Amino acid sequence: MDEMVGQKNDRGELKASRFGLAGRVLRALGPGLVTGAADDDPSGIATYSQVGAQFGYQLSWILLFSYPLMAVTQAIAARIGCVTGRGIAQNLRRHYPRWLLRIVVLLLLVANVANLGADLGAMGSAVQLLVGGPALVYTVILAGFCVLFQIFMSYARYASVLKWLTLSLFSYVVVVIAVDVPWGEALKNIFVPSVSFDSAHAMAVVAVLGTTISPYLFFWQAGQEVEEQVRRATLPLYVTPGKAGAEMERMGIDTWVGMGLSNLISLFIVLATAATLHAHGVTDINSSAQAAEALRPIAGVFTFFLFALGIIGTGLLAIPVLAGSAAYAVCETFNWVEGLDHKLRDARAFYGVIAAATLIGLALNFVGVDPIKALYWSAVLNGVLAAPMMAAMLLIATNRKIMAEFVLPWQMTAGGVVAAIVMAVASVAFIVLSL
């Protein structure tokens, strides 16, 4: 497949393949593609479904607005991993006060575990909708599968499986094709923002921003860039600056395409639920599974089936990312061996954190924790953590002692500052509106 998609010359630069630009793009896709796809997890699907059901097409513009903010933030995270050969937590540990690192990692763990529990519960409910039977049993099976998947599969195959799982996102494209969308109205709302200054609209805007720009994605993408260096037996860019051109090009394509796909699918979910649920007066959706069930009598069994199947597929993609990002953060904090490329015997703590985070998330489904409240509090924690975490990444990425000649260019710095300010305002607004 590599021969068909593209090759590298002696300097490590991507050469044009027989498929030209398309080949270069396909070859570049990796951590950014998986990270973007994982952002459309069952929790995200619930948020986008509620926005579409409650407001129709009115808030579609948010996905266009959030795209550059999300992409530049993830590009900064990827750059840190690629240049330094270390994840975000490890860079914080080496260069900044330990108290800052511990607060960040603790908040990340709490948010990730809550998100894991909500996503696992949503996946179990989706399976129940499709085949019947006990949702909790399916939830347990799916959690066990995800843990075993990460621990015992080789990294090369694991990365390949994650890439293939991104195809599950296209079920929402088919859903939009299958329903009747008034494209004139939809496109107008996508490109011409409609702003209403009331608490319901403000809460929805904040919820979407908090869902699309999540701290666990920062840790995951930086960690995956390091994993890719190990897999390809290459060195960090600060050691091999001559390869920077090709790597920066690959990373840019991967990140902007991956985040673009993520936001495009999010937009399709909003459009699908606006054209079906909102158009038929269904305006209150509390979970992704409820959104799928509500589609059945309105849009038909085929649309319902695709929507529910997408919940399961994106969950299988997101659960490893949530658990894996927690493991990267914890192991980098204590300087333990980390990485999915390691065998279990060599990285027991890393895989132990993956298992523990997943199992604690699973346990939330058995102790009477309301999954909607779990989603709410994980969104609050993600919102609280996002802005300071983005500020911490900017500190790392603009520090010449860490990044050498690869400190952020002013354009990325400006974009990162704008994204951090937007998320700070959004998180404060979220908390104020929730009181």
Image (cartoon, rainbow, N blue to C red):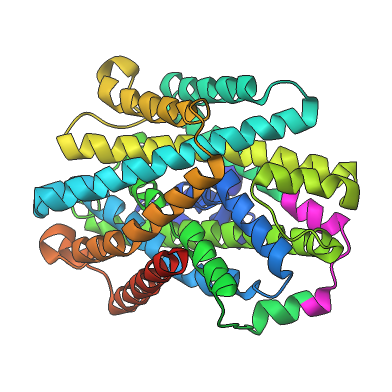
Identify whether 416 is placed above or below 318: below
Q: Position of residue 228 (x, y in %)?
A: 37, 41
Locate residue 364 relative to residue 75 in the image: left or right.
right
Locate residue 379 relative to residue 55 in the image: left or right.
left
- Based on the picture, tell me whether residue 219 belongs to the magenta stretch: no
* Point 21% across, 39% down: residue: 332
* Point 59% across, 73% down: residue: 201
Q: Position of residue 95 (x, y in %)?
A: 10, 54
Q: State which quarter of the image contains the C terminus.
A: bottom left
What are the residue bounds of the magenta stretch? Answer: 171-185
Q: Nearer the viewer, residue 157 or 377?
A: 377
**Residue 233 shows in the view:** no
Q: Quadrant of residue 324?
A: top left
Magenta stretch prevailing secondary structure? helix
Q: Nearer the viewer, residue 244 or 109?
A: 109
**Residue 241 shows in the view:** yes
Q: Nearer the viewer, residue 338 or 287?
A: 287
Task: In the displayed orientation, state which residue is furthest to the top.
Answer: 345
Q: Position of residue 410 (x, y in %)?
A: 28, 79
Q: Position of residue 206 (x, y in %)?
A: 49, 67
* Point 87% across, 58% down: residue: 179
Q: Total label count? A: 0
* Point 42% across, 71% down: residue: 429
Q: State which quarter of the image contains the N terminus.
A: top right
Task: In the displayed orientation, state which residue is furthest to the front.
Answer: 435
Identify whether 127 is placed above or below 73: above
- Based on the picture, tell me whether residue 180 belongs to the magenta stretch: yes
Locate residue 40 relative to residue 219 in the image: left or right.
right
